[in-house]
Image (spheres, rainbow, N blue to C red):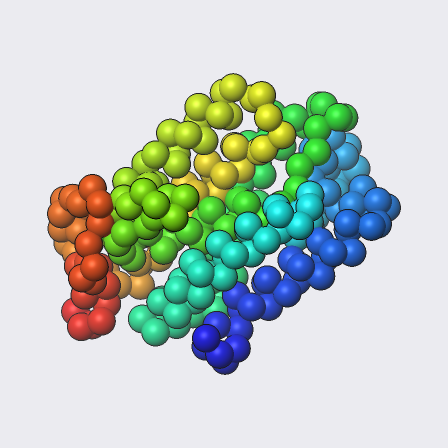
Amino acid sequence: MEFSETPITLLLIAANVIFSFIGFSNTGLVNKTIGWPYYSKREKQYYRFITSGFLHADWMHLIFNMFTLYFFGSNLELYLKTFDLGGGAAYLALYFLGLIAADIPSYLKHKDDPNYRSLGASGAVSAVVFAVIIFSPWSSVYLYGALKISMAVYAVLYIIYCVYMGKQNNDNVNHDAHLWGSLFGLVFTLGLLIVMKPGIMDAIVAELTNFSLFGRREPGKVLEYLVLGR
């Protein structure tokens, strides 16, 4: 895929890689930019909602998020541009608002806890993934490269998993950010489609009622509506 086709996705990946790489060996930078609700509240450092999304804990964390962003973000960027759905402006709005929306619940929960910190692009990446699902909910996705299910079924399982793990609170993963980033991506994209393409609601409803557990290859009704322009 050429840079000219999906420049925003590639620039976001580059920014994440550069900022994270610097942060790996610069504790001072991390302390000033990581998600730290305690300081966001007391020092009015609300920029942390954004900057923390460009930091990652290690190379595996970074690679996983950027790998996901590349494949799903490239598709989303093309959809928004090709189908006149706000193009780059809509994409950037979804990404950065997704970062903020994903961190708000954690901020409210931990704003009085000086020991809680979080980082990573997972909230924004989750918003991008779930935005793409709206366009083709019954396309196939392979969990762990082996288990074939439809993207809509994956979305439901993912949300259940995030809710469950968020309540367990027994690991170092911010499952709340994953959950709320995902939900934001769904709501934002549905709203965008309805506002920009008012006649698309029937296609969305028809698509959602056309259930497929394992997914299918042919384009769904939402993409069909957008391609045909009606």
**Residue 197 left/right relative to 61:** left
Residue at image location 48% in from the left, 72% down from the top: 6
User: Against 165, is 92 above or below?
Assistant: below
What is the x, y in percent for residue 207? 17, 51
The quarter of the picture where the C terminus appears is bottom left
Q: Is residue 20 left or right of residue 222?
A: right
In this rendering, is residue 180 above or below 3?
Answer: above
Q: Please report the residue visible at 44 percent of the width from the left and 27 percent of the height from the top.
A: 163
Residue 224 at x, y percent in the picture: 18, 65
Q: Is residue 119 left or right of residue 145?
A: right
Q: Find the residue positioned furthest to the front.
A: 146
Residue 24 seen by the camera: yes
- Counting labels gives 0
Would residue 137 be visible to someone looking at this image? no
Where is 48 relative to 96, above or below?
above
Q: Nearer the viewer, residue 86 or 153?
A: 153
Q: At x 84% / y 50%, what residue is drawn?
A: 26
Residue at 27% x, 52% y is 140
* Res. 85 image quadrant: bottom left
How far across and down, in percent of the image, does residue 169 sit?
56, 21
Residue 184, image x and y in percent?
A: 43, 44
